[in-house]
Amino acid sequence: MSSSMSPSTIPTIDLTCFGPAGSPKARPKVAAELREALSTLGFVNLTSIGTTKEELHDAFAWSRKLFGLSREDKMKAPHPAEAMPHRGYSGPGLEKVYSKEERDKDAAEDDTGEALRKIEDHKESYEVGSEDNSFQPNIWLPEETLPGYKEFARSLYDKLHQCAMRILDALCAALELSEDDAKHLKKLHSGTNNQLRLLRYPAIEAEKLSSKVVGRMPPHQDWSTFTFLFQDSVGGLELQDPRTKEYIQSKPEEGACILNVGDMLMRYSNGIFPSAMHRVTLPPVVEEMTRERYSIPYFVAPDHEGTVSVLPSLRKGGEGEKFGSVRWCDYGEYMSKHMYKGSQGEVTTNGDSK
């Protein structure tokens, strides 16, 4: 992919060589391809990260079981009225996503979050974290409500952390980090502060989305180090080319995930990898009623009180540091301040009874 051209498709990179049976000789070429994609776009499709098609099929089957429960049953594990702990079930209209630019503008004006929440997000989600995270304990459904769900979710969380470590190895190679910097970066990502999210976008009239009566997921960057996401065949995810500001459709590929750079990786890399702006909107095939859509993102974040700074390997060349140091917990608190307002019983959403 030439950095001088605007791609109409997102490149796909195979990470087999970074797996346990991979060839170390193949890593420099793959790392170079990854660096070009991420430094140019901030996102890329990945295959062979350590999951099987069968595991992904089971994950989406469990997600459908979960969201197929009655609202009464899903509300047995309700997300709190405030942003933290970011765990449990959120019904349509509860969570509001926004960009850092929008958050900064709101903070400079009245810092109430009202302007950020004018258009509600028509989605429902269930958040799962590490059982070892004392800052954000999990909120589980009773076992009898969905037998086996807790075991499934914990297992998937651990599996995707293993995949995240393979991706992190590839990122360290792509950034040409020193051995000490690579060890430091991996130590900051123990897996205790990652987040597994099961997401469902209910069917809704296409006209409501196109006229912005409601939204699915507005343009935003993730605050974490990086995110990798699996999606069903419906489509609707788009990522912005940072050079042209045009959005590129993420076309679902069976067995593949989409990797996007988050704010923390942008800071670690001194801006070599830009944080990727992305959104979920109308799918490519627009019908009167958009089909429901399922996705499973996994957010990889530094440990709760970890300090994020430009890595020493990337301070060369006389450019200096483009970003100051920040604690992850402080950054997350600032960004999440207006994501949740009020209890779920107070939320009203077009098309969903409360």
Image: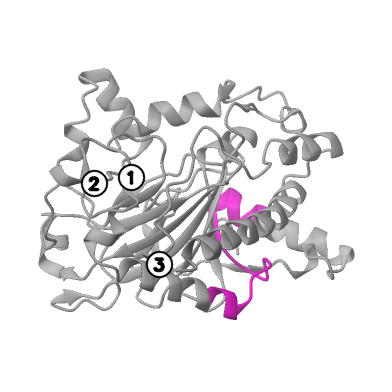
Residue at the location (61% across, 34% down)?
303
Asked whether residue 251 appears in the rendered view, the answer is: no
C-alpha span from label 2 to label 3: 23 Å
> Compared with residue 190, is residue 128 higher up or lower down, i.e. above or below?
below
> Counting other residues with Cα less than 10 Å from the Cα at mark 2, is it few (<14), some (14-19), or many (20 or more)?
many
Name the residue nearer the viewer: 327 or 12. Answer: 327
N-term mark: 1 or 3: 1
Amino acid at circle 3? Leu
Percent position of residue 110, x then y: 20, 19
The image quarter in which residue 341 lies: top left
Percent position of residue 19, x then y: 78, 65
Amino acid at circle 2? Leu
Q: Is residue 50 magenta?
A: yes
> Counting other residues with Cα less than 10 Å from the Cα at mark 1, is it few (<14), some (14-19), or many (20 or more)?
many
> Compared with residue 225, is residue 70 higher up or lower down, i.e. above or below?
below
**Segment colored magenta:** 35-56
SS of the residue at dot 1?
Answer: loop
The numbered disc on residue 94 is: 2
C-alpha span from label 2 to label 1: 9 Å
Residue topped by disc 3 = 146
N-term mark: 2 or 1: 1
Residue topped by disc 1 = 79
N-term mark: 2 or 3: 2
Colour theme = one colour
Residue at the location (40% across, 52% down)?
244
